[in-house]
Amino acid sequence: MSKKHLEIDGSQGEGGGQILRTALSLSVLTQTPVRIHRIRAGRAKPGLMRQHLACVRAAAVVAGADVEGAELNSTELRFNPHTIGSGSHHFSIGTAGSCNLVLQTLIPMLLRGAGKSRITVEGGTHNPLAPSSCYLERVFLPQLRRIGAKISLKVERVGLAPAGGGLIVLEIEPGPLLPMCIEERGEAQGIFAHSMVAAIAENVALREITAVADHYKLTRKAISHSVIEHLTGPGNVLSVWAQFANVTELITCHGARGSSAESIAARACRELDAWLHSEVVCAEHLADQLMLPLWLSGRGAFQCGGLSAHARTNLDVIALFDGPRLAVQVGVGGGQRISCQPT
């Protein structure tokens, strides 16, 4: 007898694509069929976009899943997984849609996969509406390694919006995970900046990192830039990050027509300063992304600030599935502490 589908409202809470991605990950991890309806119903363009379809199709390949509704603009999806596979797979989004969101959908399930996996994704590596590959490399993946995950990521080709054309390779090996423990930042290890430009003047990147260096009194060793030669379309991305022993926060700012290099740098510094001057350990986006790894680990906790609507929606979706329970408690400085206890 086939299992009954778990019903998930894709418009609940924040109502975005994270509901879909978390549901896919947990559907595979718990081998629970799901029916997701009203997908992105409140968005200007409801339903599945190409980026979301790439997540569905990638998860279906890994899970050997039966899928209904995996079509552009579809607002309902039935997903029935049969396994947690492994191996080498290549996925292409076909646009500048985020490679990193596809990888974040797959990573939790591959940490429980049948063996080693090598995943290649083509699309955007730096998208204004998603975490960048720099963010994954410097902020998210180090936290997975801290709990024992064997995982590596290599950007073979950068893909900036709107051109795309990026290529990322992820290698991952399943194994037992340690309890998560991120209760304080730890010792400060430095502030750094990197700017990338494609099809615009290199001077833009130099002005951005110089402005960041002036703001934080950085040495030349802490700043760098690169010119992306293979992209024909214009693009500019500035990354500024503060590294501590236990956690890193990285701010990504995309250049825009009419905005000077100095204004882009000033915005990145303001956003990073807001975190540096607070008592928050895990910043808003990292807190959201750590919920599934915490669930996978089954034990531990992390400190964060106030939870966004995005994060609360993520918690609500996780609570629909069998497994460890995540709890929200009062944390340091009036923030939140997200903890997990095995069932």
Image (cartoon, grey):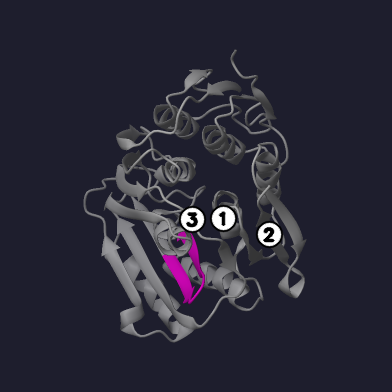
Q: Disc 3 and disc 1: Cα gap in Å? A: 13 Å
**Viewer-proximal residue among 190 and 273:** 190
Q: Residue furthest top?
A: 1
Q: Earlier in the sequence, mark 3 or mark 2?
A: 3
Looking at the image, residue 280 lies above or below residue 74:
below
Q: Which mark is residue 177?
A: 3
Q: Position of residue 65 (x, y in %)?
A: 46, 23
Q: Secondary structure at mark 3?
A: loop
Q: Amino acid at mark 1?
A: Leu
* Amino acid beneath label 2: Ile
* Magenta stretch contains residue 45: no
* Label number found at residue 338: 2
Q: Is residue 61 visible?
A: yes
Tell me where residue 17 appears, x and y as whole percent.
58, 37
Q: Position of residue 111 (x, y in %)?
A: 44, 46
Q: CA distance from mark 3 to mark 2?
A: 18 Å
Q: Is residue 73 visible?
A: no
Q: Which residue is mark 1?
A: 290
Determine whether 343 is above or below 278 in the image: above
Residue at left offset 36%, top offset 68%: 194
Residue in view at x 70 percent, y 29 percent: 9
Q: Choose the circle earlier in sequence order: 3 or 1.
A: 3
Could you tell me which residue is drawn at 51 percent across and 60 percent down?
Answer: 178
Q: CA distance from mark 1 to mark 2?
A: 10 Å
What residue range appears in magenta? Answer: 239-253
